[in-house]
Amino acid sequence: MPLKKFEKHLLSEKWQESIKDFDCVGSKDNSNFEKLNDFLKNEALRYNQENYSRTNIYLENGTCVAYYSLAMNAIKDPRINIEDEYKSLKSYPALFLTRFAIDKRYHKSGIGKAILNEIIKHAYENKEIASKFLFLDAYPESISWYLGNPLFTILYSDMAERIEKCCEARIIKELNVRLKKGYELEYELNNEAEIDSLKKNCENILNAHVSNIFKGLACENSLLENCRSRIKLNFENNRPQIKLENFNTRQNLSTIRDWFKEKNNVLNFDITIPLYLDINKYYKAIYG
């Protein structure tokens, strides 16, 4: 869809009336998309004024039909796809697409792709500030739209860490419930009454519970099963730490990407999925 039919403006007090009816939620209630509505109407102008981000809006007949917000960022993952001669850099300059939303009346109209192309075009042609990558955090409901473009890549290490933290929070919550209720599992105990043996028994009990709870999580989220992920409980300085193993491995990367490309595969976790693309490659693919 060409964008010539729309007016584009940097959000200011002048356009407050134009955004009051903006709604990107669609036919189903969605708290994540409600956050996008709320940001535009209640936070975006202040962010513009205080230089936290810049929000641009697209209008048709005086009404906002889409908006996006940009800020500066950097990607520090050493395993990011980058040319060999730049592998020594500690971080890579990135343009951060903090928010991006289309009014529900314009879903599937093509305006989203057209706006994304325009963002890339302006970033590539900017003569004052360089950005190697475009970075964003996608809601699970939107991830399949982005991954429909092969130039978008999941920032796997960041995503694995977020999933691990979510697993840890849910496991600890369920573990507390079990401990209060006296939930029992079968396990082998060492009958020696020495301090080390008692400590080991406690670790064995907790590990049995953690593994059992994780099995339930994996059943709810087929991605964890597909990657044959495991959970491990470690004790460092007498503090428990839960680690997700065998997830973010090279052989699982295509499995993870394919899983997210299916619209119905929405993680049962409250996380966003980090994505990036190479601005140079995207620009040349679109504009030659």
Image (cartoon, grey):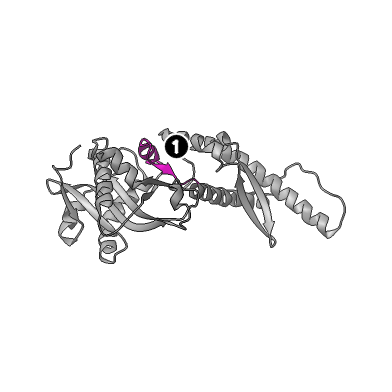
Give above or below for 113 relative to 36: above
Q: Quadrant of the N terminus?
A: top left
Query: Does 143 sit left or right of 47 as displayed?
Result: right
- Quarter of the image where one finds residue 17: bottom left
Q: Quadrant of residue 111?
A: top left
Q: Answer left or right for 165 relative to 35.
A: right
Q: Specify whether 55 is left or right of 246.
A: left
Q: Position of residue 207 (x, y in %)?
A: 70, 48
Specify start and end residues of the magenta stretch as a single range: 141-156
Between residues 155 and 47, which one lies in front from this camera angle?
155
x%, y% of residue 200? Answer: 78, 53
Q: Amino acid at mark 1?
A: Phe
| Residue 234 sits inside the magenta stretch | no
**195 lies above or below 81:** below
Residue at numbered disc 1 = 260
Residue depicted at 32% across the width and 46% down the height: 280
Q: Does dot 1 land on a helix, a strand or a loop?
A: helix
Extreme bottom residue here? 50
Residue 281 percent across, percent down from the top left = 34, 43
Residue in the image at 26% along x and 60% along y: 128
Viewer can see residue 25: no
